[in-house]
Amino acid sequence: MTGYAGCHTRGMGHYRLLCASLCAEIGPDRRLTDPIRWLAGFASILVLTFSQPVLNAGGRVAPTHMMRSPIPDSSVEIPDIVVIGAGVVGCAVTRLFALSGARVWLLEKGPDLLSSSASKGNSAILHTGFDAPPGTLEHQCIQAGYQEYLDLREKFNLPLLETGAYVVAWTDEELDALPHIVEKAHHNHVTDVRIVDRAELLRAEPNLHPGALGAAHIPREFVIDPWSPSLAYVRQAIAHGARCFFDCEVQSGRFDGQMWALDTSRGPLKTRAVINCAGLFGDFVEAINAPSPFEIRPRKGQFVVFDKSAYPLVESIILPVPTARTKGILVTRTIFGNVLVGPTAEDVPERDYPTVDQGTLKNLIAQAIQKIPALSDHDVTAIYAGLRPATQFSEYQVRSQPDRRWITVGGIRSTGLTASLGIARHVWSLYEKEFGGSFTPAADPVWTPVPNIAENAPRAYQQPGGGEIVCHCEWVTRREIEDALGGEFPAGSLGGLKRRTRAMMGRCQGFYCGAHVAALAEGKRASAPAEGTR
Amino acid sequence: MDTADVVIIGAGPAGLAAARVLKARGVASLVVLDREQEAGGVPRHCGHPPFGLYEFRRVLTGPAYARKLREAAAGIDIRTGVTVTRLGEGGLLSIVTPAGEDQIRARRVLLATGTRETPRSARLVSGTRPQGVMTTGTLQQYVLRGVRPVRRAVVVGTELVSFSALLTLHDAGIQVAAMIEENARITFQRPADLFPRLVLGVPVLLNTQIIAIEGGERVEAVLIRRGGGHEERIPCDGVIFTGQYIPENALLKHSHLEITPGLGAPSIDQTYRCSDGVVYAAGNVLRPVETAGWAYREGEAAAAMIAASLKTDQPATRSIPITWDAPITIVTPQRISLPGPALDAMQFKLRVSRQAVGRLRLLIDGRELWSRHMEALPERRIDLPRRLPSLEGASRIHIAFQEI
């Protein structure tokens, strides 16, 4: 027995003795040496505890998010284009139209960019399109978007992790399927895809389970930051006169032959054209125009994120050989220094607040460990689920109706992040050809680089004078958080703040910094009192 | 490059206690690093007593205790706002200060980075991911800042810290809808559950699992499964996941040091020394969780070992591994270095992963030297006998729990 029991010497305060007995210092045989005294001590603790000063009962309770100002009256301003939905596609479309000289308003029903569960919860892969359905609009947009992203990213300071990918065969049947995958890739203009044998595969990925039989290598399948591109696109759009309105849900509308009158949760507005990029709510918004030809059938994808300690275990994106049913589950390193496994593909009714399921998550972990056994030594940092805006069709649902001055961009599921710049180009070309009218594009576009939050490029905390680190798990500085909370285009929610900084996304999930981040956000647009996803 | 005889990573109770002892034993150049803006560790946030009984013979709140720790460490070079990003070989530390990246080299390093609770994500709890889900640590920091992050909470767990969470919620005027425990009995000593049940009117639900969290933007309810199998919904706007402490070990995992498999804790010998002979470890980074007082004493003990090794270093010629099996989940230390000081009762500790009744046995080279019948509970420290017999010729130490 140790120190605490030795405290019952004469002269010590009665209450210290009693506190001592309450502490986790019971004797090794775990029997109370004196139950009566212990109970008395326990009672005294209660008395002492309740005599502590009670927190100011006026302690601030969760503030509701700040009231938004009404939209400018149509007598003041009528935009050329309203884009509905600030997911990655809506942001890319807004950018291109603004750069082309149109007056664009971006309306988003959530509090910030990427509020929807599609754009904020995906696998962050920049797809070559090697396995896209050939000859489709999707394929065209993926490849155009891929190339344009690589062309633009340095101007925006957007990071790129050049991982490459392996479609790994684990059975003879899968091995037999590899040549077809290569052939399809070549047919899709991804000509550097080739088969690698088991020896070469295991040299490249030594932590892969030795049961791997071979693979198709896709050297230019890359990993990117899934959130910063949209921020970059919107900031550039704003620099060219675009306006964003959050907490602005489009509820109904009427077309008078020339102009749309839209009713939103922030008041009415008029516009000369509408581009529906409403993703998971695309069919509801479409119904404002005409009965929607497509129905959104959300497909949930759950993910598990492993601790950064797992990062060295895998260098490439490890893809499965797809079956008729599903594309399958991948394992990859992330640009933020973690290892990711997922997604599942589950048809669900909900269009928001997707659920994670323990059994499914454990199964994902088991599958990851099957492919990379050493992952069993590593902890889980995060879990999340995204929702794909799938429809009853497999193709993108893009439709231009110049007589209704309405363009629909629906059913962009799975590949929206890569395809977004390509989709924007395609939508612009439709508008240009079919809608008439002309704009004066910006002579010298302003470029709006965004802060880097990826691990493979310099981060703020590494700079001299980077200042105080607030989030220790992700090394996020106070200045980064303050910058994201303020300025011309501040984060609109706690989730938005997290996606701009990585704060609170690490292994401790806010244990060390949660309250501090909330205090920094106090009174700002992003304000919210406790950790969560939004 | 900056150099020092000893660098201590972590200015919590273990780190500051070690610093005091090292200074008292004449260690010339000593630096304590802490990544927070203020030294004191987790106790800074725990707004209620009891802290400080052993160290200061007073009963203090956490913040007061942390302040006294800082005062007692006056004159020691404590550098706050400094993050160690890498624990390299030969005592070379990569650090980040407000001025940028740097390095410091030490003859000895003491890892005293402490511990944190397992959050919802690592527990793989089903449901939506609304606001209002947090650990005790986060809750206490909110309350210390005068913020009530939720109005009505469910507390998950019945460890010592779970009762701390209850007190914090009470202090903050936050209702507690229930305390939920998976096992058939509370983890902490009975009758601590009388406090929530009788005094606060909070139901303590045993044999109860949390199935899912519900709610859109904010928590709206938790779905639980009671012992009988039926499900119940508890309306609330906050879920406090308490306990299930894990070592704050990111530095370790990226280093060359040996880690106890499955636990993430540094593998140490009876002198608190890690596998490379330069790095030592003390406090709650060694195993899930002890009170601040224990961490403090471990810091003192490790510091004494470090000071001794700086004077006359006795590298181990032999190492006796200590092994164990289920339901024992961790034993500290994990090996005995010979030549070296004998183990004393304070150091040899173990934990079980679940409730178990049976005979705890200490076997040296396959022969049972000591055993005791006991009921072992998870998250509770189990001590072994005060003095071990001589280990001179031994080659294996095994700790077994024979269940009946």
Image (tube, rainbow, N blue to C red):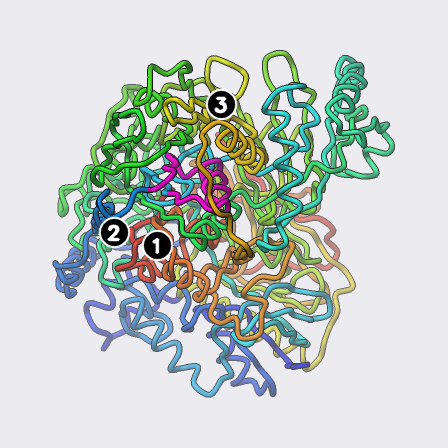
Q: Nearer the viewer, mark 3 or mark 2?
A: 3
- Asked if badge 3 and badge 2 are on a common chain, one would say no
Q: Which residue lies under the disc numbered 1?
A: B138
The residue at the point 48 percent across, 66 percent down is: A469
Q: Which residue lies under the disc numbered 2?
A: B149
Q: From this view, report whether residue B5 is shown above or below residue A106.
A: below
- For the C terminus of chain A, the quadrant is top left
Whole-percent x and y of residue A41? 20, 59
Q: How many angstroms separate mark 3 from mark 2 (CA)?
A: 44 Å
Return the residue nearer the eye: A343 or B190: A343
Q: Which residue lies under the disc numbered 3?
A: A398
Q: Amino acid at mark 1?
A: Thr
- Asked if badge 1 and badge 3 are on a common chain, one would say no
Q: Is residue A488 left or right of residue B246?
A: left
Q: Which residues are magenta?
A: A79-104
Return the residue nearer the eye: A144 or B96: A144
- For the N terminus of chain A, the quadrant is bottom left
Whole-percent x and y of residue A39? 19, 53
- Asked if labels 2 and 1 touch by Cβ distance under 8 angstroms, the answer is yes
Q: Is residue B378 magenta?
A: no
Q: From this view, report whether residue B392 is shown above or below residue A416.
A: below
